[in-house]
Image (cartoon, rainbow, N blue to C red):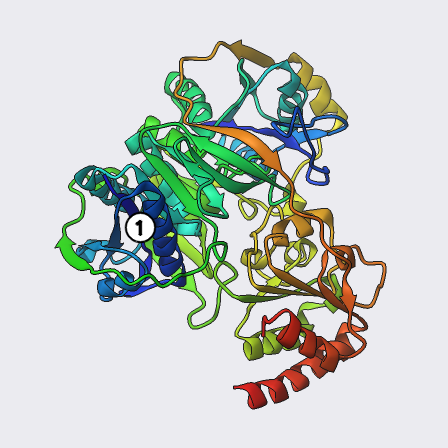
Amino acid sequence: MSVLVYTESEQGKFKKNALEVASYASAVAKMMGTTVTAIAFNTTEGESLGEYGVSKVMNVKDGSLETFNAGAFAASIAEAVKSTDAKVVILSSSTDTKYLAPLLAAKLSAGYAPNVVQAPDSTSPFMVKRTAFSNKGFAHTQIDTDIKIVGVSNNAFGAHENKTAISVEEISGAADAATNDTKSVEIDKVVGKATIADADIVVSAGRGMKGPENWGMIEELADILGAATACSKPVSDLGWRPHGEHVGQTGKPVASNLYIAIGISGAIQHLAGVSASKTKVVINNDPEAPFFKAADYGIVGDAFEVVPQLIEKLKDFKAQNG
Amino acid sequence: MKILVCISNVPDTTSKINFTDGDTKFDTNGVQFVINPNDEFGLTRAMWFKEKQGATVHIATVGGPTVEPTMRKALAIGADEAFRINTEPTDGFSVAQQLAEVVKNGGYDLVIGGRESIDYNGGMVPGILASLTNMNFINSCINLDIDGNNVTAFREIDGGKEKLSSSLPLVVGGQKGLVEESDLRIPNMRGIMMARKKSLSVLEPVDAIKATEDKKFDKPASKGQVKLADSVDQLIDLLHNEAKVI
């Protein structure tokens, strides 16, 4: 019996959340008195997981699985669960893992709890705390099945070093991987920029920016901070920014360390989407904007005056602080 | 083409969330219930297929009689027929099993559910349903076109989008983007009158595995008062020295 963790990678390199879920799996294994096995696909850096408490990596070496395929990945992970007799499976809560986790749950007849924000309350019974009601509340969810699947929220647990002796084994993809004829045709993705899902800092703007032509300064601010850009629902509805940047109850949830909201008044649906962020900063010319009640820090002022100043001052700050 | 849209009955997005019975149940007192927004995008896309490609659209909901006003709204928007599975929804796994029975008996080409409900946010019903019915599955779908048996879709990925090809029968976990917000429909009087005459069948539930149980709820800790900076310099200082986030 072991804990199995699925560590996501891209072009052979682990994503940031891989180290976080490995750390989470290590914490769960410690609670259960067992070890952690990781499954990865075509990674070139399996041994690095030894720094985060993983004692064995099953690296699926299969050229046909270079691109994410939910059905095929779920089939391979299910086989790894069986071969390691894993009772707990840990994954991230990325868009891809939220695609494959239900398929895996069905294959294993396993209960699945997504958006988990801390180590289990207990492992017998197995109880986890997860966000519910679109971040307006938390549920303490008991998983009652023999095999349990846990989706860890991004940035909720952090990566914790815990050096362990590690072995890496190369394996083949599952034989029944082609049960689903859904195939990737083309990926259109911004390369080299932080995404909302895993960014430490998110710079978000709303209708207060008055038009899409004014987004240059938002992107410049984000570049200086190494941040992802996001927007409020009205902005994506107006077509000023793509749907993928819409943060809120019906858009993306944000769980960054710093969320900067510029010209966003703070509708309840938007606040739900950002409440998991640790530090929230609001820049708005209306001191009565509801967002100020949910924020940690703020400046009451015109975004068109404050943001350019912030850009210049942050350039100086970065120059001095590296 | 025969389409089933799975509808979840959820608190309106503006609802304040409270819990009752020693924080073990969601407090429905004073809460307005609506069609889950992610399902509504799917329902509207299904209406598009009905009008442009001659599809038949059914809806299914798991729940007691209190969900019927939400189902009638979906019928008023244009769905042809409805099925209510007469049991309280508990976890996503058991809900998917109930819906799978409707899918198996109905011979649907396309099943659309929301990527997640905005209440319990389990996000697993469409995927488990696809597995239980041996149908293809696309999650977080933001664009869907069907030509004969061939499906072209886009799904959201972290940092962009992915174009996919697939075939029917297919289950879709849908969201905003399947249609634009401005395309969502408000039922008109004629639709409301017609909905009263449409079939809303009540089906008894099948035995299902309950895989998870929400034992207790709590709310985020209340925030302290916002600290307003007088200048950009002060804000940077606070973020660096106090919050330690830059």
Residue B148 in sight here: no
Percent of width and height locating residue B74: 62, 26
Residue sitting nearer the eye, A180 or A3:
A3
Which residue is at a point 21% across and 55% down the rendered structure image? A57
Percent of width and height locating residue B98: 44, 20
Residue sitting nearer the eye, B159 or B123:
B123
The C terminus of chain B: image quadrant: bottom right
On the image, which quarter does residue A178 sit in? top left
Question: Is A257 displayed left or right of A65 in the figure?
Answer: right
Which residue is at a point 72% across and 60% down the rendered structure image? A295
Residue A308 in sight here: yes
Check the image and report above or below for B211 versus A116: above
Q: How many labels does the image show?
A: 1
Check the image and report above or below for B177 versus B160: above
Percent of width and height locating residue B244: 60, 71
Label 1: few (<14), some or many (≥20) within 10 Å?
A: many
Which residue is at a point 56% across and 90% down the rendered structure image? A319
Question: Is B98 displayed left or right of B193 in the figure?
Answer: left
Percent of width and height locating residue B107: 38, 21
Residue sitting nearer the eye, A65 or A101:
A101
Question: Is B39 displayed left or right of A64 in the figure?
Answer: right
On the image, which quarter does residue A217 sit in? bottom right
Q: Provide the residue designation for mark 1.
A: A6
The N terminus of chain B: image quadrant: top left
Check the image and report above or below for A15 versus B13: below
Secondary-structure class at tag 1: strand
